[in-house]
Image (cartoon, rainbow, N blue to C red):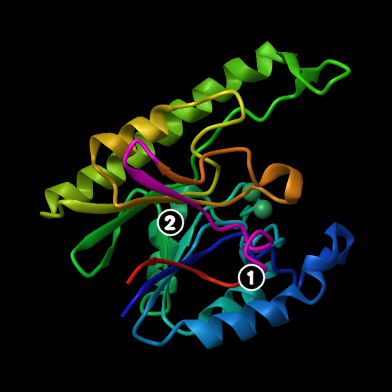
């Protein structure tokens, strides 16, 4: 029994969105997902998919993508990504009813792996635009967008706190925290997300969203203030699920 994570599958079985345009790593990436997940994850394992599942805009346009995910081995838990337009937060319980026993949608609730509560939300972080000098150093940024980002961070923190609260109320004392967005941006050393991870002594913080060599180092990777941070973007891992807990 093990806990795995993989993010940003960006499937497009129905939507017209060929991913090859984003580089070689994305060529037939769905075949790699199928191969590596089947090779690694057993039916008794848990696999958390950390958002950006499908390019479909509405649920009927995501059916094949979700069916593909359903066909992967293990207990599948899905987090919301910024591209998951099919998933309205307010309709999470409706999704959980419809996909009961097949997929679990993690939002304002929690999932369980052994004696760990799996908590999470999409998260948010200010991604610029940043203004650079000739040497590529950051000399400023769009402050209006930064203000807006702060509001989104607050809203996501409320959702994350609710997930922790429900898990704690149910008696859980051990947590693994999942985000779609990185916990910090390139300007930050800490954030409300790292603070809550420390507050609850999360066993790990798992996130994705960062694509391409130049973005993989945007946030924390490795152990920071006692907590392991893992980037699990599909292209970062070449679509091999990462082991979070044995
Ligand atoms: Fe993505
Ligand atoms: Fe994303």
Magenta segment, principal secondary structure? loop
Residue 44, quarter of the rendered image: bottom left
| Front one among 47 and 190 | 190
Q: Residue at x 25, y 58 (%)?
A: 117
Q: Are marks 2 and 1 in contact (CB under 8 Å)?
A: no
Which residue is tagged 1?
239
Residue 21 on image: x %, y %: 89, 60
Categorize mark 1 by other alpha carbons within 10 Å: few (<14), some (14-19), many (20+): many
Alpha-carbon neighbours of circle 2 within 10 Å: few (<14), some, or many (≥20)? some
* In this picture, residue 176 sits left or right of residue 38: left
Question: Is 240 placed above or below 72 here?
Answer: above
Helix, strand, or loop for circle 2? Answer: helix
Report x, y in % for residue 28: 79, 77
Check residue 10 in the rendering and tell me which mark sits there, or answer none.
none
Residue on which the image places disc 2: 92
* Residue at 70% from the left image edge and 25% from the top image edge: 128
| Residue that protrudes farthest toward the left in the picture | 171
Answer whether residue 119 is visible to the viewer in this image.
yes
Q: Is residue 180 above or below residue 9?
A: above
Taking 153 as reference, is 97 left or right? left
Residue 72 visible, this angle:
no
Q: CA distance from mark 2 to mark 1?
A: 26 Å
Quadrant into which the N terminus falls: bottom left
Query: Is the C terminus in the top left, top right, bottom left or bottom right quadrant?
Result: bottom left
In this picture, which residue range is highlighted in magenta? 224-238
Badge count = 2
Residue 85 drawn in magenta: no
Local SS, label 1: loop
Quadrant hosting residue 27: bottom right
């Amino acid at each position: 029994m093990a806990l795995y994570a993989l993010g940003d599958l960006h499937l497009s079985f129905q939507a017209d969105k060929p991913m090859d345009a984003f580089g070689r790593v994305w060529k037939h990436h769905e075949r790699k997902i199928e191969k590596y997940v089947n090779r690694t994850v057993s039916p008794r394992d848990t696999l958390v998919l950390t958002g950006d599942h499908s390019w479909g805009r509405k649920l009927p346009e995501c059916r094949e993508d979700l069916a593909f995910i359903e066909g992967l081995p293990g207990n599948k838990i899905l987090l919301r990504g910024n591209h998951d337009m099919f998933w309205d937060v307010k309709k999470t319980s409706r999704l959980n009813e419809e996909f009961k026993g097949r997929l679990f949608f993690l939002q304002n609730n929690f999932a369980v792996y052994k004696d760990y509560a799996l908590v999470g939300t999409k998260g948010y972080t200010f991604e610029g635009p940043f203004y650079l000098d000739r040497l590529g150093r950051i000399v400023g940024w769009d402050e209006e967008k930064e203000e807006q980002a702060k509001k989104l961070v607050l809203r996501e923190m409320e959702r994350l706190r609710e997930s922790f609260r429900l898990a704690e109320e149910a008696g859980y004392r051990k947590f693994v925290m999942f985000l779609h967005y990185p916990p910090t941006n390139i300007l930050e050393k800490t954030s409300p997300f790292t603070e809550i991870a420390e507050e609850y002594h999360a066993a790990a913080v798992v996130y994705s969203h960062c694509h391409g060599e130049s973005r993989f180092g945007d946030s924390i990777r490795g152990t920071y203030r006692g907590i392991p941070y893992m980037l699990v973007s599909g292209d970062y891992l070449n679509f091999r699920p990462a082991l979070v807990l044995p």
